[in-house]
Amino acid sequence: MKELIESPFCDGYAHLKSEMATAEYRKEQYRYTRYYYVCDGTGIEFTDDETDEASVGQVYSQYREKYGIPAPERLTAWRKSYGLSAVMMSRLLGLGENQYGLYEKGEIPALSVGRLLSLVGNRNFIIYCAKNSPLSEKEKSKVLKSVGHSSCKEKSEESSLAVVV
C-alpha cells in the first residue's frame, strides 16, 4: 500500500492510516489492523481494494490458522506437485467441479471441507481418494501415476488410509 495517494475527494492527497479493529467472521471475533486513507483536504476516511484486501486478509488468515485450513498458496503447490488440474482435484475429493480452484483463489471453505483440504498434502490420502473415487479407471490411473503409484488395481498398505498430519 502506498503511504500517499491522490485523493478522490479533492485536488490534494490522502495519507494511509491504520488502527486496531475487530471484525466478526462466522460468528467469531477477530482483531486485525484496519488500513484506510484520510483525505488531507476534506478529512474523509476511505478505503480502496488494496486496503480492504489487506484488512480482510488478516481475518481470513487468523480463521485459517485457528482451524488448520491450508492457505490458497499451499493448496496450489500441493496440486501442482501431483501434476493435476484444479478440476481433477475437485473431482478426486468429491467437490463441485470448480470448487478446488475457488479455494486456491482464496475462498474460505466450510470447516468440514477445510479439514478435508488439510489432508491434500498427504500422498497416501490422494492414493486412497483415487482408489476409492467414482473416477473412471483411466482417470484413476492418471492420478495414481501422477503421485508415483504404480497401479490402480494394486492392493497395498497404501490403499488403507494412513494419514500423518
Image: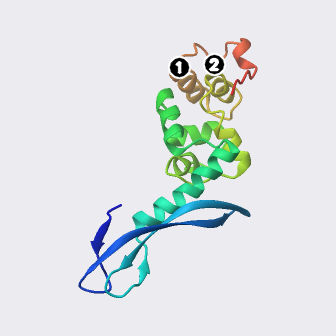
Q: Could you tell which of marks 2 and 1 lies nearer the N-terminus?
A: 1
Kindly identify the amino acid type of the residue bearing the numbered disc 1.
Lys
Q: Nearer the viewer, residue 60 or 73?
A: 60
Labels 2 & 1 near each other (Cβ < 8 A): no
Q: The N terminus lies in which quarter of the figure? A: bottom left
Q: Nearer the viewer, residue 118 or 160?
A: 118
For the residue labelled by badge 1, is the local secondary structure a helix, a strand or a loop?
Answer: helix
Separation of marks 2 and 1 at Cα, in angstroms? 9 Å
Q: Quadrant of residue 89?
A: top right
Q: Horizontally, is 85 left or right of 129 in the view? A: left
Q: Nearer the viewer, residue 120 or 3?
A: 3
Q: Position of residue 131 (x, y in %)?
A: 68, 25
Q: Please give the name of the residue rendered at 28% of the width and 86% of the height, measured from the top-left corner.
A: 10
Q: Residue 99 shows which numbered tag?
A: none
Q: Please give the name of the residue rendered at 31% of the width and 86% of the height, measured from the top-left corner.
A: 41
Which residue carries the number 2 mark?
A: 152
Depicted 58 relative to depicted 153: above or below: below
Q: Residue 145 shows which numbered tag?
A: 1
Depicted 69 relative to depicted 17: above or below: above
Kindly identify the amino acid type of the residue bearing the numbered disc 2.
Cys
Residue 153 visible? The answer is yes
Q: Position of residue 103 (x, y in %)?
A: 56, 49
Q: Please give the name of the residue rendered at 67% of the width and 16% of the height, measured from the top-left corner.
A: 153
For the residue labelled by badge 2, is the local secondary structure a helix, a strand or a loop?
Answer: loop
In the current view of this chain or complex, which residue is farthest to the left? 11
Q: Horizontally, is 79 left or right of 7 in the view? A: right
Residue 26 visible? The answer is no
